């Protein structure tokens, strides 16, 4: 427990996670990038004393990557378990971050794990393995309504119980910045105010808006001694957009408010 990472609970999610874990229910965390989903899973794994295996899914992530493959070792071929197989055997919490990004065969592979069977068929070995009682599947999904985000099929979503994550309200987010960076309260408050101002500028049409992660990064830079304006420019504005006009307006806004 002493390694428990800092996690500011927002809406009773720890109790929900604990019940899901106890009852072997797969859990889907929905929410935009950088709003605390991964931190929450790290926190819960530590709290429950479980090993956590995290896979950041991307468009090349295939079922083989997760399940395992034969590799050539000298004159022999040997089977090597992938991270999903390891998690199932060892009873770890398997966190598939951004599940919708993975190849469709990953989604197919998790089907038998997410229902009463709790098993995985490894076709290359012709074997079915039963999940350890402590195994739990957690996935995250970014329901970004803008272009460029992949959807999760309803038939997949309905295999999970689901929790929605949002950027925290100002008071809570200010507290997170203080705890994460050591920055003082008044600066943290200003940074959060800028974050919320930009989040409300929906007319900018940003693909993704300011995450808590970006605000934490800005706070870390400021706390480290970099100028406040420059910290906001490089940690908040530049990662958000490449459009020159938008960049200039956002930098002006930060300069005014910080
Ligand atoms: P996600 O997995 O949703 O993309 P992360 O969990 O990586 O986001 O969060 C990004 C950062 O934001 C974390 O490293 C942490 O500094 C901060 N953060 C966001 N929400 C919280 C929270 N509720 N408690 C503590 N830190 C948080």
Image (cartoon, helix red, strand yellow):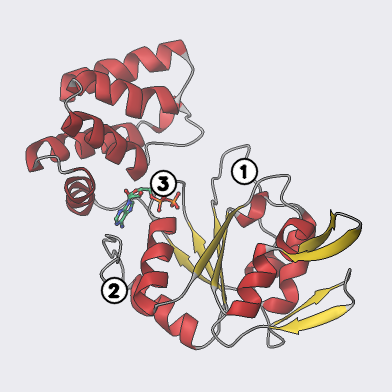
* Looking at the image, residue 75 lies above or below residue 158: above
Q: Position of residue 91 (x, y in %)?
A: 57, 80
Q: Is residue 151 visible?
A: no
Q: Can you say which quadrant of the picture contains the C terminus?
A: top left
**Does residue 190 appear left or right of residue 27 in this picture?**
left
Which residue does the numbered mark 3 point to in the structure image? 34
Q: Residue at x 86, y 54 (%)?
A: 74
Determine contact: label 3, label 1, CB under 8 Å: no
- Looking at this view, name the residue that lies furthest to the front: 74
Residue at disc 2, secondary structure: loop
Q: Position of residue 34 (x, y in %)?
A: 41, 46
**Label 3 beta carbon within 8 A of ligand 1:** yes
Which residue does the numbered mark 2 point to in the structure image? 1
In the image shown, does 114 or 122 lie closer to the viewer? 122
* Looking at the image, residue 149 lies above or below residue 190: below
Marks 2 and 3, the one that precedes in the sequence: 2
Q: Position of residue 123 (x, y in %)?
A: 88, 71
Q: Residue at x 46, y 48 (%)?
A: 32
Q: Position of residue 89 (x, y in %)?
A: 65, 79
Which residue does the numbered mark 1 point to in the structure image? 149
* Looking at the image, residue 205 lies above or below residue 23: above
């Amino acid at each position: 427990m002493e390694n428990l990472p800092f996690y500011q609970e927002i809406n009773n999610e720890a109790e929900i996670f604990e019940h899901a874990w106890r009852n072997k229910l797969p859990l889907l965390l929905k929410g935009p990038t950088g709003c605390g989903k991964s931190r929450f899973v790290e926190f819960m794994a530590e709290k429950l004393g479980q090993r956590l295996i995290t896979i950041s899914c991307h468009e090349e992530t295939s079922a083989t990557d997760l399940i395992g493959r034969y590799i050539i070792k000298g004159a022999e071929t040997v089977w090597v378990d992938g991270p999903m197989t390891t998690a199932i055997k060892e009873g770890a919490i398997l966190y598939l971050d951004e599940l919708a990004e993975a190849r469709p065969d990953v989604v197919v592979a998790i089907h038998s794990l997410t229902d009463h069977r709790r098993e995985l068929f490894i076709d290359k070995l012709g074997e079915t393995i039963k999940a350890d009682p402590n195994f739990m599947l957690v996935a995250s999904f970014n329901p970004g309504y803008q272009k460029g985000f992949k959807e999760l099929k309803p038939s997949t979503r309905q295999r999970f119980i689901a929790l929605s994550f949002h950027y925290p309200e100002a008071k809570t987010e200010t507290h997170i910045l203080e705890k994460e960076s050591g920055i003082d309260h008044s600066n943290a408050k200003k940074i959060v105010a800028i974050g919320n101002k930009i989040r409300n500028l929906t007319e900018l049409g940003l693909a993704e808006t300011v995450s808590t992660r970006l605000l934490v990064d800005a706070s870390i830079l400021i706390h480290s001694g970099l100028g406040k304006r420059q910290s906001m420019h490089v940690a908040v504005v530049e990662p958000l957009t490449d459009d020159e006009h938008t960049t200039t307006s956002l930098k002006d806004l930060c300069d005014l408010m910080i």
